[in-house]
Structure formats: C-alpha cells, structure tokens
C-alpha cells in the first residue's frame, strides 16, 4: 500500500472520530484523485467511511442512501475538514500541537476540569485535572490516535 494512502487512513480515522461518536458533528471529506479531479463528501455522524480489502475506500452516506467506492490506487490525497457549527468548533478550548510528540498544550479551560485521554478503541489512557492553560506530558503514551475529552469538548489528536 502506498505511504500516502497510509497517511490518508490515519487522517480518515481522525476526521471521523472512529469508535467514539461526537454529537451533531459533520465533516467534509475531499478525495483528490491522481488525474487531478476531486470528489467532495459532506459526512454526518451517521455516515461511515471505511476500507474494503485494503483496496477500496467505501463512503456510505446513509441520509441520502448513497454508497461510493473508490479504488485506493486512484487516490492521491484525502483531506478532512470539520464543518463550521459543530460542537467541537463552538468550544474555546484549544489543543496543540497536533500531531504531538511528548507535550500536549491545553488552552482556555474554564475553571478546574477533569481531562481524559482515550485511545481510539475507547480505552481510557490518562486522566488529570487541569485549569486554564496547561502543558501535559504524554510521552508515555504509545504512537496512535487519541481523543482528548474535556467537560465542554472532544478533540482528536495524533501522538507520534
């Protein structure tokens, strides 16, 4: 499998939140093809995107009863954008950098809050109390996709 496709798999997992749904979230997915064309999909939390036999990208848009299959060899790049008005964008809490290596910065927490970091499969990996702006050491976490949950928002991160 091409390395750019592997990076795309990582981005799709992050964009769609994988196993932990986020309330009323929508994501715009742009699939850039090798021939220079683009296909754009507005995905809701009920829609699904997955890979079939490591050869085909499948996009199921349940609301409009449409299924799109694209051969991975025809894909140059996949870009995901969370659309304005989602619960995550309404929050003032900021998480950076993303991707992160060892230290995660959390900004604009209102008051003392419990912050939890979940692996993409739903396992709780770390919980801590934070207030305002804080740097959190996550060097002990393995490389992977994580969800950082505060009282008011959930953020997707990549740990390198």
Image: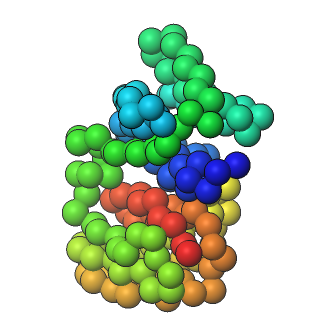
Residue at the image point whose x is 45% and y is 16% from the top: 63
Residue at the image point whose x is 50% and y is 52% from the top: 11
Question: Closest to the observer: 32 or 93?
Answer: 32
Question: Closest to the observer: 142 or 113?
Answer: 142
Residue 73 horizontal/vertical position (percent): 62, 37
Relative to 34, 123 lies left or right = right
Q: Is residue 27 visible?
A: yes
Relative to 30, 133 lies left or right = left
Q: How many marks?
A: 0
Q: Is residue 57 visible?
A: no
Residue lying at the far top in this picture: please name it.
65
In the rendered image, which quarter is residue 97 located in?
bottom left
Relative to 89, 54 lies left or right = right
In the rendered image, the vertical position of residue 44 relative to residue 83, given as above or below: above
Residue 33 horizontal/vertical position (percent): 46, 34
Residue 154 horizontal/vertical position (percent): 41, 58
Check the picture and name the quadrant holding the C terminus. Answer: bottom right
Relative to 53, 70 lies left or right = left
In the rendered image, which quarter is residue 106 located in?
bottom left
Residue 1 horizontal/vertical position (percent): 70, 49
In the rendered image, the vertical position of residue 73 relative to residue 20, given as above or below: above
Residue at the image point whose x is 23% and y is 74% from the top: 108
Residue at the image point whose x is 40% and y is 45% from the top: 80
Residue lying at the far right in this picture: please name it.
53
Question: Closest to the observer: 139 or 116?
Answer: 139
Residue lying at the far front in this picture: please name it.
35
In the rendered image, the vertical position of residue 149 relative to residue 110, given as above or below: above
Here the colouring is rainbow
Question: Closest to the observer: 23 or 34?
Answer: 34
């Amino acid at each position: 499998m091409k390395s750019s496709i592997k990076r795309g798999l990582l981005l799709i997992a992050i964009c769609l939140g994988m196993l932990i749904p986020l309330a009323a979230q929508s994501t715009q997915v742009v699939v850039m093809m090798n021939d220079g064309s683009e296909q754009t999909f507005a995905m809701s939390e009920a829609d699904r995107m997955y890979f079939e036999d490591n050869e085909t990208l499948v996009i199921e848009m349940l609301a409009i009863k449409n299924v799109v299959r694209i051969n991975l060899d025809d894909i140059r790049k996949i870009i995901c954008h969370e659309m304005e008005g989602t619960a995550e964008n309404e929050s003032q809490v900021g998480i950076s950098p993303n991707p992160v290596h060892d230290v995660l910065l959390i900004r604009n927490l209102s008051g003392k809050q419990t912050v939890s970091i979940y692996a993409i499969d739903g396992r709780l990996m770390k919980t801590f109390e934070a207030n305002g702006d804080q740097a959190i050491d996550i060097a002990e976490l393995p490389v992977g996709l994580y969800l950082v949950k505060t009282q008011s928002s959930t953020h997707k991160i990549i740990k390198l």
